[in-house]
Structures are given as C-alpha cells and as structure tokens.
C-alpha cells in the first residue's frame, strides 16, 4: 500500500543536535521514518549542509532546503520595533516561503509546522490538513523573562511577550491540530487561546544513546548541560553561581562545577575566574555524554522557560541524579523525591545538592528509579507512535 506523504516544515536546520527542540524533533522524525508516512523535511540549511547528509537521511525520506537567513545583531535590534516578535521575525524567508508553497502545491496528505515561528514560512490558509507542533508556550517564556528582568530589559521583555501573545493566538487557531509536549502545556494553550482541543505527546529520550552508568561511591562534581547562548540557561547558571554555589562550597570546599554547552558568555566565564570558583566551561562538545558522566549530580537551575527540558531525561538516562527547580521539571511526568529532588530558591537548591553529594545510597536509589521510569514510558519510539497517530487522525478528519 502506498504510504501517505507528510511535509514537515522546520524553521531551523536540525543538525548538529545541539538544542532541545532540534533533539526532540529529530527523535520523533527518526521514530516515524519508515512508518505510515513518507516524510519530506523542509528547512533552512547553512553552507556545507551536505556534510550532514547521512544524519538527515535518518530523519526523512527527502530533504528540501533553502538558504539559511543571516541573523545578525542589527537585524534583531531592528525587529524590536516591528509588529512580529524578534524570534519570529528572524525566521522570515522569501526563499523558504517559496519552497514550502511549492511542496504544498504537490498535495501532501498532512503538513506539520514545527514551532509557531515556522508559520511565517507557510500561507495563511493551508490547503491540506495541518498540524502545529508547539514545544513551548512561547508567550509564557517571554513573560517569565520579564518577571525576573529589571529596568529597561523588563520593558523590552513585556513588549515582546505581548507581541508573542498576539502572534501565537492568531497562528494556533489556523491549524487543524495543535500538539503540546505535556498535559500542563496543553491546558495552558487551551485556556490562553481558547482552543477546543490540544493533542498531547510525551517527552522522550534515546535510551540506547544514553546508557545507564551507576553513580560512583564518592562524589564532588556538579554538572549542567545546555546551550549557553540560551537566555534561560544563562539566567539559571547566573542564579546557581550567585545564590546557590556559595552555600555549597561553604559546606563542601572541594566541590566542583562543570558547565557543558556551546557559547558560554565571556562575562560569565570571567566572573567565575575572578571569584576563584572551581568551575569549568566546556563550550561546544560533539558528545555531552562523557561530560555529564564526569559529574555526580546534575542540576537544572532554571527560573524562566516553558515546554519540557530534555536535559533532565538525558541525565536521568545516564544515571546521574537530578536536582531541579520546579520549573526545570515542569511538564515531565516524574515524581519529586523518587526520580529527582525538587528545590526552589538558593538555600533549598544548595541543600538538595549537598544532600546528594553526601549520600551515595540516595544517589543510587534516585538514579535507578529514574532510569526504570524512562525505560517503561519515555523512549522516542513510543513518542514517535503518539505523533504519527495524531498526524493520521488529522489527515483523516479533514
């Protein structure tokens, strides 16, 4: 039987897999490939994208690129004055719009638009059954940035949040199906934008790529992994440095911190050096696994953001017990106290880190329980089946 055709429109080139959204999208596409749909992936592509041809082929049957737009500081600054949120305006592409229009003219059975931002690459009225895949509640991210910002930046974030609220409301209502990555996000989107129904998928993890390693008996290293050019991660690591770490080293002077992720701000690195902290910043790494495994406790000190954090499941899969703010684990259906330790505020976060560093039995118990939960419920294979079923229902309904 001839397979149906799915056009998947991404606003970013998916490779290398160095961001949570790219990892989630690619995990789902790889799980769906060879199933009910022939997958056509359309996205911008940088010069030399052919070097990633083998990886692209694992996620789709055909790849349709257009030149990636340049995103300089001047363009982002000018976008602040526009009607579109900056993060949306920088995805506008005449070439991309033309490529997507041409593929839609070929009559796919369903089109999936990845992130609301990518809607600027598609026509206002979609001629085929349509799915919008939301990894976050985008306006909520900006509102949370505004809540922790001060001075002029607070005004900037509030204005961006208002623009995103208007954009997101308009875009989500144009699609036959909206997909959220957690029940919590589904409720938030439905209530915020008056949506009758939001389809849900779980967050997944590649359990083969992230094999379990039991925690060591002795512990002294804390680790964080995440793109360090992300505003949410910069805020979280600044919070960790200023409000948590002094309390940790007061009790454990030998404690060390490893920050794994691309493009750490020079000012943050210099601050750690100036304060004489036992912190290391790796910058970009080809493989985060050995770096996470070099830590004894993984931390997610996030205070802003939305959606779900893949870094939590990656650390859990590898066997590293996690300490997280409530927001850091938001939307992930795992239990505080059993699968991770939850802590809010500097003193509580420091206490949770110290509790794990000082208790090898607790580290083993949490790490083992977390890995077992992931194996039972959260592989990408299971999530890919969920997403494929949603696409099939959408195609059939129209």
Image (spheres, helix red, strand yellow):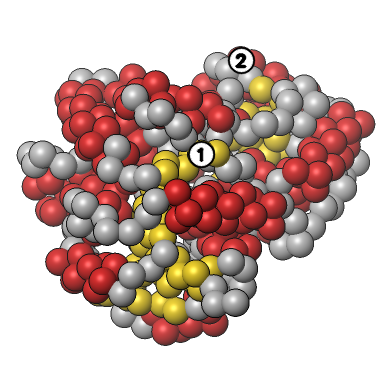
Horizontal side, residue 10 vs residue 159: left or right: right
Instruction: Classify residue 288 by image quadrant.
Output: bottom right
Q: Residue at x 42, y 41 (%)?
A: 178
In x, y percent, where is residue 155? 18, 23
Badge 2 local density, few (<14 within 10 Å), some, or many (20+)? some
- Find disc 1 in the rendering and name its residue: 199
In x, y percent, where is residue 342? 66, 22
Vertical comparison of 121 with 177: above or below: below
Q: Residue at x 37, y 40 (%)?
A: 231
Disc tally is 2
Q: Residue at x 29, y 37 (%)?
A: 173
Badge 1 local density, few (<14 within 10 Å), some, or many (20+)? some
- Find disc 2 in the rendering and name its residue: 347
Instruction: Classify residue 83 by image quadrant.
Output: top left
Gap between marks 1 and 2 measured at Cα: 38 Å
Q: Is residue 366 visible?
A: yes
Circle 2 sits in a helix, a strand or a loop, which is it? Answer: helix
Vertical comparison of 313 with 340: above or below: below
Camera-side residue of 4 and 269? 4
Camera-side residue of 41 and 36? 36
Camera-side residue of 171 and 175? 175
């Amino acid at each position: 039987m001839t397979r149906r055709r799915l056009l998947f429109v991404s606003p970013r080139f998916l490779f290398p897999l160095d961001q949570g959204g790219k990892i989630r999208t690619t995990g789902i596409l790889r799980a769906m490939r060879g199933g009910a749909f022939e997958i056509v992936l359309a996205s911008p592509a940088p010069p030399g994208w052919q070097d990633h041809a083998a990886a692209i082929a694992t996620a789709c049957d055909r790849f349709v690129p257009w030149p990636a737009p340049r995103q300089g500081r001047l363009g982002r600054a000018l976008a602040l004055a526009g009607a579109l949120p900056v993060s949306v305006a920088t995805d506008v592409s005449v070439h991309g719009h033309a490529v997507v229009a041409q593929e839609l003219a070929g009559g796919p059975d369903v089109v999936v638009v990845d992130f609301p931002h990518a809607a600027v690459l598609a026509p206002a009225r979609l001629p085929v059954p349509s799915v919008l895949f939301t990894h976050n509640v985008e306006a909520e991210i900006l509102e949370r940035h505004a809540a922790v910002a001060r001075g002029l930046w607070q005004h900037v974030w509030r204005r961006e949040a208002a623009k995103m609220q208007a954009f997101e409301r308009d875009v989500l209502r144009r699609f036959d199906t909206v997909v959220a990555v957690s029940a919590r996000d589904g409720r938030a989107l439905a209530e915020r934008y008056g949506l009758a129904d939001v389809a849900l998928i779980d967050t997944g993890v590649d359990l083969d790529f992230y094999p379990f390693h039991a925690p060591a008996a002795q512990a002294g290293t804390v680790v964080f992994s995440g793109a360090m050019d992300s505003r949410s991660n910069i805020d979280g690591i600044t919070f960790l440095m200023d409000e948590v770490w002094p309390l940790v080293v007061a009790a454990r002077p030998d404690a060390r911190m490893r920050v794994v992720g691309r493009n750490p701000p020079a000012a943050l690195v210099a601050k750690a050096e100036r304060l004489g902290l036992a912190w290391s910043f790796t910058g970009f790494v080809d493989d985060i696994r050995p770096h996470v495994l070099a830590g004894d406790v993984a931390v997610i000190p996030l205070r802003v953001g939305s959606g779900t954090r893949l870094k939590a499941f990656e650390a859990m899969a590898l066997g590293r017990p996690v300490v997280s703010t409530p927001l850091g684990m938001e939307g992930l259906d795992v239990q505080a106290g059993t699968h991770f330790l939850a802590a809010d505020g500097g003193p509580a976060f420091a206490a949770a880190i110290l509790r794990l560093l000082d208790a090898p039995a607790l580290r083993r118990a949490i790490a083992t329980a977390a890995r077992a939960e992931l194996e039972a419920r959260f592989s990408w294979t299971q999530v890919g089946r969920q997403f494929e079923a949603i696409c099939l229902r959408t195609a059939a309904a129209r």
